[in-house]
Amino acid sequence: MHADLSRLTFRPAKHYSGVLAQQGRVQLDADANEQTAITQHQARTLAADLIGQHGGPHGATGFRIDYCPGENKLDNLAVHGGRYYVDGILCDADRPPAGTPAGTPAGQEPTTTPHDAPAGPDASDGGTGGEQHPCTDGSVWTYWDQPDAYRDPEKPADRLPAQFPYLVYLKVWERTVTAAEDPELREVALGAALPDTAARIKTVWQVLSLTGTDLGAPANPTADQVRTAFRSWSDAQRATAATAAFRTERPERSDDEPCLTRPDHRYRGPENQLYRVEIHTGGTAESATFKWSRENGSVVFPVAALDGTWVELATLGHDDKLDLGAGDRVELADSAYTSRGESADLLRVEEVDLPGRRVRLNAEPGPGTGRLPGLHPFLRRWDHRAPGGRGTARHHRNGALKVVEGMWIDLEDGIQLWFEPGGRYRPGDYWAVPARTATGSVEWPVAADSRPLLQPPAGVDVHYAPLAWVVGGERAVTDLRYTFGPLAVPVESAGSASRE
């Protein structure tokens, strides 16, 4: 999660059930965030234990899929409203109504259904409910306008498969949203000079497709055979095959530095930091790249306008630690870019125009990102530099750093990173490590002999569930969802109980 955090302390293996605040103590963000993580972990574990890997409540089971042939247009899918749980995570497919502006004449109100109303006579029955054109019903989402998938008809890879059969599935994950992306989170009464307050965790769901060939299902499969094949496919997608470790080593010529830190400290930075190492482009070590930040990737700058290589920003930062300078690496992002999990080139700041709140980049950002104000574009600063800058990692590729396995990589100020050989890297996977001036080291688990232990990524944790098997023809869709009924039953009368 990209947020201004001191550290991440939730450890499921410790089996803590709550956080207790003590009187007269300093209140830390890490304690409050750990309580949130504990509560979330307990609730989702309970839901998954009771529901199973996925399922929805009877009568309001969401994500029923209708296939809509494109004829002269692109094929489409209707995604009906309701609720569905994937690994205990609640996903809500209800489409909010458009709302009615004040002063609208009677009879001209929007015709969308209420936000919590199930779609059709029974959202769990898999039928069409008599709807002739479900993909033109403004009360439900469709494949092309679902809120967090940002499918682009101009991109062939985003289109539904042209050949039948294919699988429609649900992809679920979480990401952090700050006021840079959702301005409504900012309390304007605090003034523009103060930073924003708390961030939010957003559950992202996306309805996507997978060809039958890629799924590996047998010919003319039953619903259970499709589910079994999908389980194998999703397990492979979620398999963690990359591990990393951190340590600190006192850099050479430390004795020549000014006495900003104790001479025996291995971490030579002047401040406490939460370092974040994040995979930028995935694959094996031959193609994978990473980026790093000493602020957990939380330093962002809302974009007001983009003109070639010049970017006008809403602010250039609140101080010299959180601003932009020539040589900084930045990533142009927006809601669509972040939700799609894409990886564009990291750009370099060449010039800063303080009066105009503008920066000039070394190249024009690629098409499709940062140009629509409604997607809230922003620049995210990363702290690795070109060779000879503050950072000492020197293997660059498209602005990011090349993954090098089996050796200690210098980041800065004595912090070193190790990638275990044979890893398979996924974009967005990250590791976070606190660096502390009090100990002159990083907080990282170690073995009995003090060697750093390899750890899997802290995220992103992606979850999957099958929704429908689209075969075309008269029987276009086979429903693959599960549904569950309420646990409550009527209370027996006292007379009935006594007779038993």
Image (spheres, rainbow, N blue to C red):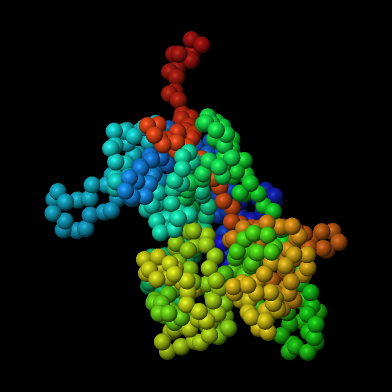
Image quadrant holding the N terminus, namely: bottom right
Left or right position of 391 against 380 = right
Residue 99 in view, yes or no: yes
Left or right position of 461 against 420 = left
Q: Quadrant of residue 52?
A: top right
The picture places residue 344, in percent across and down from the top left corner, at 53, 68
Looking at the picture, does residue 480 appear above or below residue 295? above
Looking at the picture, does residue 351 appear above or below residue 443? below
Residue drawn at x 42%, y 32% is: 58
How many marks the image carries: the answer is 0
Residue 335 versus residue 17: which sits nearer the camera?
335
Looking at the picture, does residue 79 appear above or below residue 299? above
Looking at the picture, does residue 300 appear above or below residue 486? below
Left or right position of 73 against 170 = left
Residue furthest out toward the top: 499
Left or right position of 395 against 153 = right
Residue 433 versus residue 374: which sits nearer the camera?
374
Residue 10 versus residue 235: which sits nearer the camera?
235
Residue drawn at x 49%, y 13% is: 498
The picture places residue 30, in percent across and down from the top left corner, at 60, 62
